[in-house]
Structures are given as structure tokens and as C-alpha cells.
């Protein structure tokens, strides 16, 4: 599973949260099975770390969007997020 880091980053940016999470779960299963060689395990772990960061970023962005939704008398409207 030797993939160039640039290729992994490009493909990663195109993944939805759900697709990245599904791939991460599959990588974890492969690592837990103990069937991968040491080099493959390292590659899987590296990819997993990138997928984890990607999922966290997607969740952070989603949370920011949700935080901007405010109930108003006229219904739901978007407003700049307030901190504090």
C-alpha cells in the first residue's frame, strides 16, 4: 500500500466525512487483524492519521456551521458565530 503523500492528500481532500470514516474503520480492522506486514502497517497507520485529521476537520467545519444557525421570530436564520 505504498502511496505518495501528495496523492494521499489530494484524494483525502475529495473524501466526504462518511467516506473517510468508512476508510478509517477498514484500516483499523486491517491493523487489528495482524495480517499486514510491518511496512504495510506503517503505511496504514499513516493513512489512518491523515483520515482522522480529515474527519476532525470536517466535524469542526460542520459544528461551526451549526453554531451559526440561530432561531429568530421569523424562523431559522444564519448569523455570525458568537464566541464566549
Image (cartoon, rainbow, N blue to C red):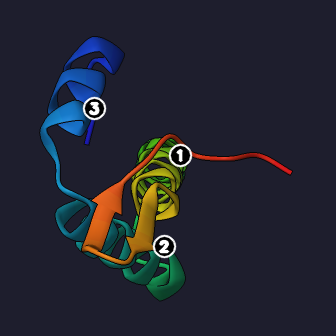
* Label 2 to label 1: alpha-carbon separation: 18 Å
* Label 1 to label 3: alpha-carbon separation: 20 Å
Q: Position of residue 46 (x, y in %)?
A: 51, 41
Mark in front: 1 vs 3: 1
Dot 2: few (<14), some (14–19), or many (≥20) neighbours within 10 Å?
Answer: some
Name the residue carrying label 2.
31
- Relative side of 64 to 16, left or right: right
- Whether residue 41 is visible, yes or no, is no
Name the residue carrying label 1.
53
What is the secondary structure assignment of the residue under circle 2? helix
Q: Residue at x 45, y 67 (%)?
A: 70
Label disc, if present, on residue 2 of the rendered structure: 3
- Whether residue 79 is visible, yes or no, is yes
Please state, as top left, top right, bottom left or bottom right, where the N terminus lies in the image. Answer: top left
Q: In this rendering, is residue 47 above or below 70?
A: above
Q: Residue at x 45, y 86 (%)?
A: 33
Amino acid at each position: 500500500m505504498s502511496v505518495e503523500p501528495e496523492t494521499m492528500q489530494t484524494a483525502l481532500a475529495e473524501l466526504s466525512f462518511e467516506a473517510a470514516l468508512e476508510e478509517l474503520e477498514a484500516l483499523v480492522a486491517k491493523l487489528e487483524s495482524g495480517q499486514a506486514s510491518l511496512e504495510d502497517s506503517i503505511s496504514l497507520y499513516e493513512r489512518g492519521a491523515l483520515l482522522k485529521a480529515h474527519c476532525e476537520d470536517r466535524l469542526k467545519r460542520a459544528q461551526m456551521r451549526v453554531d451559526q444557525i440561530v432561531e429568530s421570530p421569523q424562523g431559522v436564520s444564519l448569523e455570525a458565530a458568537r464566541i464566549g
